[in-house]
Image: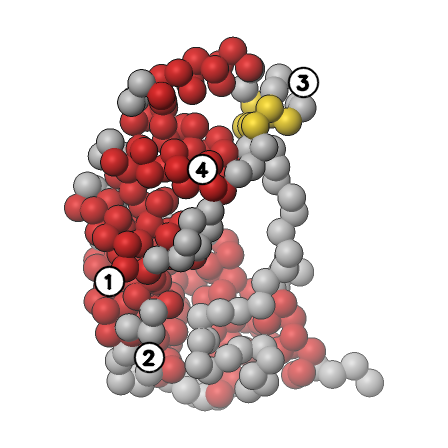
């Protein structure tokens, strides 16, 4: 496998297409924004969350002009206020920002603290974010623990991550058959985004190509790679197909 396509040390990191600029995302009048801001300044957690989300994504006015420009620093500040007020979704988002260093200094330990608080507050998706944060800190065993928690709560996105860990033996013993079964389950799931389904098809194709967990079948691998890249937006699948089907 070409390490430029997939890094065996971090096989969950695939090359991505550059996304389109989405700013600003939401429409709101100046009066509505001022009203929202006043509520947030008085300690309303939902309003604090909305203000933070506005700075995170940007607001436009009714004419489509920029009303609030994106500011990750201001977003983080308001997410912190909402988090302090007990808003579980804000706690989760703040944890993610701390884990990535978006708008704040990167602080994985503090990120874990807020993410676990969000999880205890009923934000089930925080489990997956906790797992990712542990993984980014190279604590693969704890990452596996939290990916399993996330999967047990019905998050099929976590199954894909578990499959990757089993395939490459990161935090667990290598188990190609288990990985293959998890990839197939993700592909068939109705509860995942299409980008994750494309990734699952890519990893499933890799298993067929390498004959790990399943009989080596290059034709099936090619079919799955085409499926992963059916919208032309999966660089890893496209690159691997080009290796398998070089132009004359």
Whether tag 4 and tag 3 are in contact, CB under 8 A, the answer is: no
Q: Earlier in the sequence, mark 2 or mark 1?
A: 1
Give the residue drawn at x 38%, y 34%: 78
The residue at the far right in this view is 248
Q: Considering the numbered disc 1 on the image, is that residue within a helix, a strand or a loop? A: helix
Q: Considering the numbered disc 3 on the image, is that residue within a helix, a strand or a loop? A: loop
Q: Pick the quarter of the image with the N terminus.
A: bottom right
Residue 93 lies in quadrant:
top left
Q: How many marks?
A: 4
Q: CA distance from mark 3 to mark 1?
A: 45 Å
Percent across and percent down for residue 152 are 21, 58
Q: Earlier in the sequence, mark 3 or mark 1?
A: 3
Q: Earlier in the sequence, mark 2 or mark 3?
A: 3
Percent across and percent down for residue 201 are 49, 68
- Label 2: few (<14), some or many (≥20) within 10 Å? many
Q: Considering the numbered disc 4 on the image, is that residue within a helix, a strand or a loop? A: helix
- Which residue in the protein does label 1 denote? 146
Side (left or right) of 18 relative to 153: right
Q: Where is 83 relative to 180, above or below?
A: above
- Label 3: few (<14), some or many (≥20) within 10 Å? few
Percent across and percent down for residue 242 are 69, 78
Give the residue drawn at x 37%, y 52%: 98
- Which residue in the protein does label 4 denote? 75
The residue at the far left in this view is 120
- Label 4: few (<14), some or many (≥20) within 10 Å? many
- Which residue in the protein does label 2 denote? 170
Looking at the picture, tell me which residue is in the foreground, 226 or 83. 83
- Label 1: few (<14), some or many (≥20) within 10 Å? many
- Which residue in the protein does label 3 denote? 63
Q: Where is 102 relative to 187, above or below?
A: above
């Amino acid at each position: 496998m070409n390490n430029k396509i997939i890094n065996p040390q971090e096989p969950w990191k695939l090359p991505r297409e550059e996304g389109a600029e989405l700013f600003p995302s939401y429409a709101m009048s100046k009066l509505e924004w001022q009203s929202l801001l006043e509520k947030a300044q008085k300690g309303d957690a939902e309003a604090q969350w909305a203000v933070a989300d506005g700075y995170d994504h940007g607001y436009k006015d009714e004419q489509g002009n920029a009303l609030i420009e994106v500011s990750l620093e201001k977003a983080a500040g308001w997410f912190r206020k909402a988090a302090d007020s007990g808003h579980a979704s804000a706690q989760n988002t703040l944890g993610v920002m701390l884990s990535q260093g978006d708008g704040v200094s990167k602080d994985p330990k503090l990120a874990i603290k807020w993410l676990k608080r969000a999880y205890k507050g009923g934000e089930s998706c925080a489990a997956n974010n906790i797992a990712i944060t542990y993984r980014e800190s190279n604590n693969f065993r704890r990452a596996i623990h939290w990916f399993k928690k996330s999967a047990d709560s019905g998050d099929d996105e976590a199954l894909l991550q578990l499959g990757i860990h089993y395939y490459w033996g990161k935090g667990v013993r290598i188990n190609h058959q288990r990985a293959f079964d998890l990839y197939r389950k993700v592909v068939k799931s109705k509860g995942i985004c299409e980008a994750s389904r494309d990734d699952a098809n890519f990893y499933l194709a890799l298993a067929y190509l390498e004959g790990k967990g399943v009989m080596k079948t290059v034709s099936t691998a090619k079919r799955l790679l085409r499926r992963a890249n059916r919208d032309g937006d999966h660089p890893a699948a496209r690159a691997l197909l080009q290796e398998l089907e070089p132009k004359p």
